[in-house]
Amino acid sequence: MTFFLDKNASREELTDAVNYLLANFIESKNININSGEITAQTTGISGYLYRYLSIKYADSWDGQVNFSNSPTNRLYYGVYNSDAIIEPTDFTKYLWTKVVGGFGTTKFVWYQVTGGRQIQILVDTARPFANYFPDAGLAIDLDLLTVASVDDLTLITDNIGLVNNLIDEFKFAPKSPDTVVGLSLPAELTTSSPVVNVGTLSATWASQTANKVFASPNGAPGTPSFRALVSADIPNLTVTVTAINYSILTGDNIIKVTAGGTTQTLLTAVGNTGKVFTVNNASTGICTVACTGGQTINTVATQIVPPGSSMTVYSDNANWQII
């Protein structure tokens, strides 16, 4: 491949030229087609043959123990070079490197792609340099530069005269595109969307008109919304029918008495503030409503409900009061 660049060269043409020059630096190199490693005699691994580099983590030299996509508390990291964007889950494909002291919970793999499918990898607790990025658990595209610095280019100026002119033109560092994540929510919610690169998506309830409730549509299934209550929203009250003396329970609402001469005993008013009961005397005789624990109904211990009448009481957390 030959490059001819003039002063009107596009950024894409300049990037391709730099990638080519960095990948073909004049020095004896060895290529391992299995691992993808391109090794220079003096500098070790100088680049990779294939486009994508996958990184995984483990607790053994061969990657077999605790093979993981996360560095947390792992002891080794492994790399695998291929043309497949999907990272393999076979630990035997990776070349493993031990991390001194292990990753713990604070160390991460940071990388910098510098062109020519060359990558610098460091393990640190924080970003070592501005142009380094953390491993995000996805295959790294070695054809996408995270930096193309003049220092990288000057390494080859003694061997390729073209770079002398290229450096003057190449004054930019191609910027990785921003990652923008948005969240679309119903109108009842407001959100911090979008988030660019780093941040947390959050949602809060939007302000609503007073005295509205969040409910499904009236009378039919559908998407819920804030609306006014209707009678159909109120559930039916339970009706307990008794013909004997009865101790009223928390789950009762209406107590229908069908036999006169019986006593209906209220539960304690204490701890039941606002609780409401209705005693309906459907018999031909009187029925008595009584209290427990020395409590009262409108200041007296018992109340009489005549035949065909009802009495509704509520708790004020100390005693019962007739409505």
Image: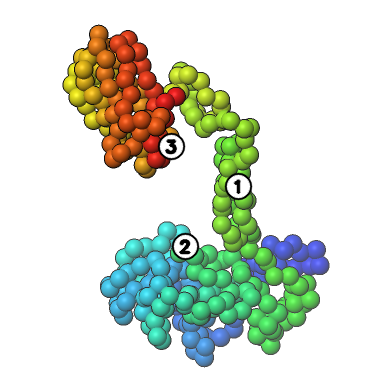
Q: Pointer 3: residues within 10 angstroms few (<14), some, or many (20+)?
A: some
Labels 1 and 2: the sequence-earlier one: 2
Question: What colour scheme governs how the chains and residues are painted in the rendered image of this protein?
Answer: rainbow
Disc 1 target residue: 191
Direction bottom: furthest residue: 42
Task: Give the crowd class for mark 2: few <14, some 14-19, many >=20 residues within 10 Å.
Answer: some
Q: Earlier in the sequence, mark 3 or mark 2?
A: 2
The first of marks 3 and 1 along the sequence is 1
As drawn, 312 above or below 210 = above
Q: Is residue 103 visible?
A: yes
* Residue type, label 3: Asp
Residue 189 falls in which quadrant of the image? top right
What's the amino acid at mark 2? Leu
Task: Name the residue tied to disc 3.
Answer: 316
Q: Where's residue 86, x and y in %?
A: 42, 58
Residue shown at 23%/24% (left/top)? 263
Mark 3 or 1, closer to the camera: 3
In-front residue for pair 124/159: 124
User: Between residues 192 and 147, which one lies in front from this camera angle?
Assistant: 192
Q: Which residue is mark 2?
A: 138
Secondary structure of residue under mark 1: strand
